[in-house]
């Protein structure tokens, strides 16, 4: 997972100069930033996948004890969507 995270950080750093240029009105820099953001999005997804793999791995850090499922209240949620959300902490 560390390699994926380092790639993500590198991509963000590479975009920094063009972001400043795009803010200043440079249209070509804006195009480069949008392309880089797509790569950043993909790299962030790779990091997310690696984190989930670690969570679901056998005996690794972040794994749930036997008999406990991820997600807190049980079940898989409601909407069937793929983004965000999650469950609120239980009181």
Image: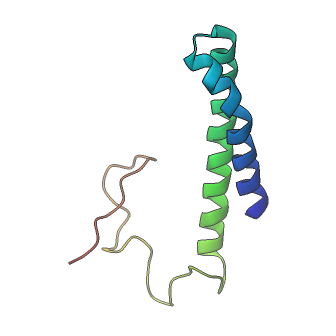
- Residue farthest bottom in this picture: 66
Left or right relative to 90: residue 67: right
Residue 17 percent across, percent down from the top left: 70, 28
For the residue pair 80 and 44, the one nearer the viewer reads as 44
Q: Residue at x 69, y 32 (%)?
A: 15
Of the pair 42 and 77, the residue shown nearer to us: 42
Q: What colour-coding does the image apply? A: rainbow
* Quadrant hosting residue 31: top right
Query: Furthest-right residue in view?
Result: 3
What residue do we see at 38% from left, 49% from top?
Answer: 80
Q: Residue at x 64, y 10 (%)?
A: 26
| Residue 56 located left or right of residue 28 | left
Residue sitting farthest toward the left: 91
> Where, by quadrant of the figure, is residue 91 drawn?
bottom left
Q: Position of residue 44 (x, y in %)?
A: 63, 48
Measuring from the top left, give residue 24's x and y in whole percent.
Answer: 58, 15
Name the quadrant containing residue 25.
top right
Above or below, comparing residue 41 to residue 31 in the picture: below
Q: Residue at x 71, y 40 (%)?
A: 13
Q: Position of residue 1 (x, y in %)?
A: 73, 63
4 over 38 or under it: above or below: below
Q: Is residue 52 left or right of residue 7?
A: left
Q: How many marks?
A: 0
User: Does residue 21 lie above or below 70 as drawn?
Assistant: above
């Amino acid at each position: 997972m560390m390699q994926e995270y380092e790639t993500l950080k590198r991509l963000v750093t590479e975009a920094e100069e063009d972001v400043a240029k795009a803010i200043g009105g440079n249209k070509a820099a804006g195009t480069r930033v949008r392309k880089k953001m797509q790569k950043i999005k993909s790299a962030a997804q790779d990091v997310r996948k690696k984190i989930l793999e670690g969570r679901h791995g056998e005996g690794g850090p972040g794994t749930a004890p036997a008999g406990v499922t991820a997600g807190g209240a049980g079940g898989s949620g409601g909407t069937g969507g793929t983004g965000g959300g999650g469950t609120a902490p239980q009181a």
